[in-house]
Image (tube, rainbow, N blue to C red):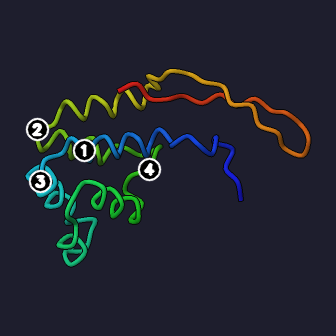
Amino acid sequence: MKSILHENRLSPFRILLFDFSQELTHQDVEKMKYLALDFIPRGRAEDIQNGLHLFDALERNSRISPQNLDLLKEMLVKIGREDLASKVDKFRRGKCAPFLVTRSFDGLNKDFDFCQIML
């Protein structure tokens, strides 16, 4: 099944999480893993080595999603990464550069508005 998102564009949520994973230090990830022990089984938490693994585990447990970033923001604030927590707020407010994608479905052209998050 094809997504309505342009095949060559990443979702803003994925970009946000990837950017965070690049900016988190090993110590940051360890602190976040500790904070997430109520949501991620200890055995699974021990396997988490970086931010992407942590975000994947939180998503799998339905703790974060594009519409649900409260836990992520709270964790970032708790570990002293207010700089990244502010990016969550920008994401929520839709601080983005708009672009239009025209797609053809069943011979009909449709325009879809998307945005690229400006972090």
**Residue type, mark 2 in image:** Gly
Count residues near mark 4 (Cα–Cα under 10 Å), then give few for <14, some for 14-19, many for 20+: some
**Residue type, mark 3 in image:** His
Q: Choose top left, top right, bottom left or bottom right for residue 23.
A: top left
Pick whichever, 26 or 79, lies toward us: 26
Q: Earlier in the sequence, mark 4 or mark 2?
A: 4
**104 left or right, relative to 28:** right
**Label 4 to label 2: alpha-carbon separation:** 22 Å
Residue pointed to by mark 2: 80
Residue pointed to by mark 4: 65
Residue pointed to by mark 1: 22
Residue pointed to by mark 3: 26
Residue at far bottom of view: 43
Residues at circles 1 and 3 in contact by the CB criterion of under 8 Å: no
Q: Choose top left, top right, bottom left or bottom right for residue 30.
A: bottom left
Q: Earlier in the sequence, mark 4 or mark 3?
A: 3
